[in-house]
Amino acid sequence: MATRRRTLLKVIVLGDSGVGKTSLMNQYVHNKFSLQYKATIGADFVTKELQIGDKLVTLQVVVVVVIWDTAGQERFQSLGAAFYRGADCCALVYDLNVSKSFDSLDNWHEEFLKQANPSDPKTFPFIVLGNKVDIDGGRSRVVSEKKAADWCASNGNIPYFETSAKEDYNVDEAFLTIAKTALANEHDQDIYFQGIPEAVIENEPRGGGCAC
Ligand SMILES: Nc1nc2c(ncn2[C@@H]2O[C@H](COP(=O)(O)OP(=O)(O)OP(=O)(O)O)[C@@H](O)[C@H]2O)c(=O)[nH]1
């Protein structure tokens, strides 16, 4: 049987726990949002098909959870490497009401490059999302747009979006930029879930995910 060739784009979503990674993914793919917090265990992923120009694209969005211990060492190091392999883009998410989540961007950026080991770390595409812009109508934000934009500029002119998964603000725009950025860095693939360890495909606790 012939395999239909499609472009599979793999996007890794990273950021501190609770910043809204899963909510952004669910809002984008399922148009759903819940205020209930359910911690991601290991990793979670969904796919969405979209047309970009003349290309049919399957965007695979993978939320990876990495736990840092007190010494700043990553505990799920080997898991991280397996998930990051073959990534076409990495989205770094922080909560613009939580200063620490912004400070962690350096760690996530560095950790991703170390684990994914892209052929050219200087040109590998990232995107930064400052989420939860809806809270208190923006009055409780502690990270200014300028501070975030400066970080993005000094790390290779990374595109920056302020988003609300709750109010579906800028979510489609951010993911479209992610897809286009990833497309510029694509690896054509015939196999849908290439790069995802088999255990993930077998254990799908919520909409495709991994109870690792
Ligand atoms: N007000 C508001 N709440 C949000 C937004 N995005 C997420 N939340 C809430 O923040 C909490 C954490 O959201 P998650 O999407 O689970 O965060 P996460 O980054 O995936 O968390 P981990 O799975 O622990 O890594 C949940 O209670 C969400 O309802 C947002 O844009 N605005």
Image (spheres, helix red, strand yellow):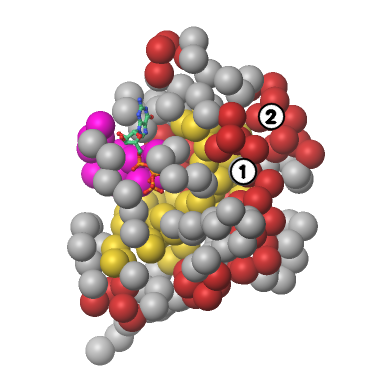
Q: Which quadrant holds the N terminus? A: bottom left
Q: Quadrant of the C terminus?
A: bottom left
- In the image, taking residue 41 as reference, residue 113 lies left or right, namely right
Residue 194, numbered circle: none
Image-quadrant location for residue 6: bottom left
Q: Which residues are magenta?
A: 20-35
Q: Separation of disc 1 and disc 2 at Cα? A: 15 Å
Position of 3 with respect to 142 (left or right) is left
Q: Secondary structure at mark 2?
A: helix
**Residue 3 vertical position relative to residue 144 in the rendered view, above or below:** below
Residue lying farthest front?
Answer: 70
Residue type at numbered disc 1: Ser
Disc 2 residue: CB within 8 Å of ligand 1: no
Relative image position of residue 126 (x, y in whole percent): 62, 49
- Residue drawn where x is 73% and y is 62% of the image: 121
Q: Magenta stretch containing residue 133, yes or no?
A: no
Residue 62 x %, y %: 41, 58
Q: Residue, x 50% and y 24% (percent of image)?
A: 97
**Residue 109, percent across and down?**
65, 52
Q: Name the outermost residue toward the bottom.
A: 1
- Earlier residue among tags 1 and 2: 1
Q: Which secondary structure dominates the residues rendered in magenta?
A: helix
Q: Which residue is mark 1?
A: 104
Q: Check the image and report above or below for 117 versus 59.
A: below
Which residue is under mark 2? Answer: 149
Mark 1 and 2 residues: CB-CB less than 8 Å, in contact?
A: no
Task: Give the structural element (helix, strand or loop) at label 1.
Answer: loop
The answer to whether residue 1 is visible is yes
Residue at 41 percent of width and 34 percent of height: 171
Residue 25 is one of the magenta-drawn residues:
yes
Residue at the spot x=51%, y=46% of the render?
A: 15
